[in-house]
Image: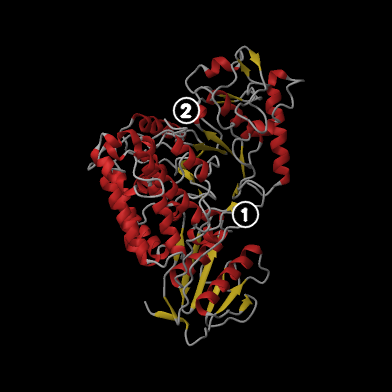
Amino acid sequence: MKNIPFYKDGKSNYVIVQPSSPDQIHQDAVQLLNDEIYKVCSITLPVITDNESPQYHEIIIGNCPNRNTVFGSTILLDHDEFYLFNKDSKIYINGNRRGLMLGVSYFLENYLKVKKLMVTGRNGAQPIECFKVKSLPEVYITKFNFNIQKPAFSYRWVVSQEAYSKNYSNFNKLSYWDIKVMQPAALEDSGESVHNLTRLFGYQTHFASHPEYYPYINGSRTSELMTETQCHRAPCLSQAGVFDIVKAALQAKMDEKPDKPIWNLSQPDGMTDYCQCSECAPKHALPGGFSNTLFPFINRMAKEFPDKIIKTLSYVVSDHIHTVETVYSNGNILPAGKVEPNVMIIYCPTINNKIKSIASSNELIAGTYREMLYKWSQSGGKLFIWEYLVNFSYYLFPFPTLHILQENLKYYKSLGVSSFFAECSSTEDSSLRALNTYAYSRLLWNPDDDLEGIISDFCKNYYGTGYKEMFQYITTLLKYANNDNSGVWNSMGGTGSMIGHANPVLSVEGTTLFSIKHLKEFYQYIDDALAKVNINSNEWAAIKREQICLKQVEVEASCTYAHRLSTNQDFFDYFTRYGGGNYGNTPKGKIQNRCYDLQTDCLSLNPPIENINGTGRKITPYVTDVINGAGYN
């Protein structure tokens, strides 16, 4: 197709057309378009309304009745969907609500080559954006036919610093986080955060007057572990009074935010026991356990709010489907294993091997998860997946999952999964966090996209002149992860859960991911990449962070397996390179040299790496504990 001249010789003939009374989304879309055009072309396009006389060159944004006359009828768009098309010298961009922002971002990325990848801030409310926008001497736009874009998953969240930026989320088509200073991050369109059942109930407020509302544990009603600071139990869900209290609290929340269509109602985190009263115990003894009181409770609540989506967790004590029916106050019955159509089930696979695909792994837990996912897919509700991209005790530890992502996403899509939540690290560093956020954003929109092309595109735009070596490192890491059989890669395991994977002596020349052979290869790629970029540039810091992640693997290995230095020559030879530092050549000296090297690297970056896990553990006491041999299995 013939190219359209958009910008040449310092000027453009185009104007932007918006509705005569633009709402906030239309205003934001026009502002975004003009801001980025200015960065690329150093010009600002005039903005007119669709009531004004048509111009030959126009970019028509959103619902402009006097311009959108090329279709015989309105094009219906669902959540986040958008379309673009070109007719003569006019460019049309439209979308459903926020889909308009996504459409403008898509136009800017694909036709003005604007990429938004790097966020370096550590403040969740105000991420520091380091986006690269290349100025161009001239811009031609290839004529294009009607292009409608629809996401594979309606909601697509990733927990990461990158995704907390609305600018980043627009360009990479992720769902929004609502970030406010000193408040928990809230999901787009959602009115409550998870684990809120006991919070809505009021914690210990009712114990004196209604002890029967509280769980019967070990022979008595108790309100222990039901405080604001330590909440790991749910109330007795068989009590009508509990239902009424939670319903009233949820109604009050909805009244405060009437525009929010999705409302969480889910169990506390960390539950290990639940009510065993005479009404609950027989249900909990059946297959399904706690689900047998939770999901009938959720069903009855969803029936009270038919115009809202009630979102709940299928997680740990509730990860099996309920095997009891739901009985409503009017005598109607919903069969066992069924939920109301406005119930959204958040299924959380917590203990599977994260480097093996749920869709095809022959491991027992993967088969169990497939069985449960199929049953939930037949329950009549909406299915949502909550996945984990890190080990929460070891944020820096490389935790490769991209090699199985496409297979899993296609499997989830075949089951009718409508939304996806990927939990990485938020304001803390974790291995390949930026790549994970970018790749997940692309594949959640289109699971058939080219993963290798996504990784290559990311590396070129993120690592500067070191991109080839970093591409080699990442693809090699994923290849070796695919062949690794060293045991379960667990996201939920506590301190010590990843140490087995940090043992290079397991297979010096073999196929375990962190064999000495592989560590040497990984370091070579990263060292070569660092040598190609300007020191202390954003690209250098990004590469250095991945080198630091490998160093933590070695710290764990050198500490945990130090006793083998005298018995395994390969292991000994590998760690002799850390002799001669401030702490000398003894086995303990080598450990100290490696540990303090990690600490220095972490704290010398800008911004520094301070927290190394999900509980706020700091790098300095971590290094001290490693040297002293404390806190490890």
In the picture, which quadrant includes the N terminus?
bottom left
Position of residue 434 relative to residue 278, above or below, is below
Q: CA distance from mark 2 to mark 1?
A: 36 Å
Give the residue displayed 49% in from the left and 57% down from the top.
Answer: 605
| Residue 482 falls in image quadrant | top left
Q: Residue at x 73, y 22 (%)?
A: 207
Residue that badge 1 annotates: 125
Residue 541 found in image quarter: bottom left
Judging by the rendered image, the residue that carries numbered circle 2 is 320
Of circles 2 and 1, the one toward us is 1
Check disc 2 and give the amino acid type: His
Above or below residue 556? Residue 28 is below
Q: Amino acid at mark 1?
A: Ala
Q: Find residue 553 and name its label.
A: none
- Image: 224 above or below 78: above
Q: Secondary structure at mark 1?
A: loop
Q: Position of residue 196 (x, y in %)?
A: 63, 35
Residue at (39% x, 29% y) in the render: 368
